[in-house]
Image (cartoon, rainbow, N blue to C red):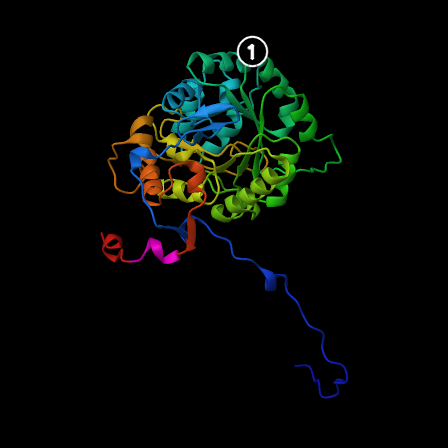
Amino acid sequence: MIDQRGASTARPLPAFRSKLDAIRSTYGFEDVSLAPGTSTIEPDDVDLGQSFCGIDLAIPVLASAMDAVVDPAFTGALARLGGLAILNLEGVQTRYDDPSEILGRIAAAPDDEVQHVLTEAYAAPIRDELVARRLDEIHAAGSRAAVSATPGAARKWGPFCAEHGADLFLVQSQVSSARHLASGYDPLSLEEFTRFMPIPVAVGNTTNAEAAFLLMEQGAAAVFVGVGPGAACTTREVLGIGIPQVTAIADVAGARDAYLERSGRYVPIVADGGMRRGGELAKAIAAGADAVMLGSPLARAAEAPGRGVNWGMAAPSAVLPRGTRIKVGTVGTLDKILFGPAGVSDGSQNLMGALRQSMAALGAGTIREMQQVEIVYAPSVVTEGKSWQRGR
């Protein structure tokens, strides 16, 4: 013990401040609920459609650029139902003439071997002719061609894809910022990239309002929101970063509204990840999203190429994997997952029916009206009165 009897008391101690003194509360889907208002409407009168980056959507659903979810055939299946699927340009579809064999190996690999199988599968080179072929196949399937690449690959594949018929190019990374510093190479300038690209360029992912606003100023046609909420993603555990989705969506939506007021241009927001049930889709849109991007929920469709499994797109990294293979199963057709009839009562099927019912109960006839409904902090809403359900 230190003897402090002789310590001076002439000067008062300074005020000590911790960075946690100003810590703010953030909210995920299970923390909030949507509050009914003064009016309701018929579910059949709810309009889920919108124009997204020049592409007409009948439903606010995008399929994640994940190899277990999207191949050219899947893009056509989702397009026929009114949504849009995004193909990963750096995945197995552009490395193998016929990816079915490697997809089967990934699905069948034992848990203790799957990391090696993934790393080996993604070591094969991306081939120009396969990129062009996949774009043709997407159009032949009846879909608009939306593709995704990381910033490091965007310089090459952006112009190439635009020349070969792509309709939308997504520059997607773990965390997108308006200013990336690098000493070893010249990073992509989004402002220059969007200026010379003849097709819309969407950008993701972010959780920060200021970053989103600057990305919009630099020409982003849409901004994707979410760092690490996906079921197959381990970014939050591996890197310790991320913001719960409801807060992230609301923050970025605030930036969108401010940018609209300043520029007159509306930039749609896409909630990417963390959603499995219809109620979570409803909360994402109420928080400010214009559309949702789904991965694992759609990987459960019979049309998905993943054969009942899904994996994060950073999972194949040979240096620092930030994803895992998860077994999601195959529960039915894409039509059943999106439009029912649902065979389960947990809200994971007939997602669009659930969204319609939610919007109707809240008096929201359009996506824009749904963005105006009241959100309340209600962590007990998940458990209140549900003791018998928990006991089953």
Picture quadrant where residue 178 is located: top right
Q: Magenta includes 383?
A: yes
- State whether residue 276 is above or below residue 133: below
Q: Is residue 12 left or right of residue 237?
A: right
Q: Outermost residue toward the bottom?
A: 5
Q: Residue furthest front?
A: 38
Between residues 44 and 143, which one lies in front from this camera angle? 44
Residue at figure coordinates x 57%, y 15% from the top left: 127
Which percent across, then down, holds residue 167?
53, 19
Magenta extent? 379-384
- Residue under pointer 1: 129
Residue 231 can be seen, yes or no: no
Q: Nearer the viewer, residue 318 or 140?
A: 140
Which residue shows up at 54% across the image and 23% down it? 168
The disc labelled 1 sits on which kind of residue?
Answer: Glu
189 horizontally vs 48: left or right: right
Residue 171 placement, left or right of 279? right
**Which residue shows up at 35% across the image and 31% down it?**
300
Our reading of the magenta stretch's main secondary structure is helix
Q: Looking at the image, which residue is at 46% across and 16% down? A: 138
| Label 1 residue SS | helix
Report the front residue among 29 and 49.
49
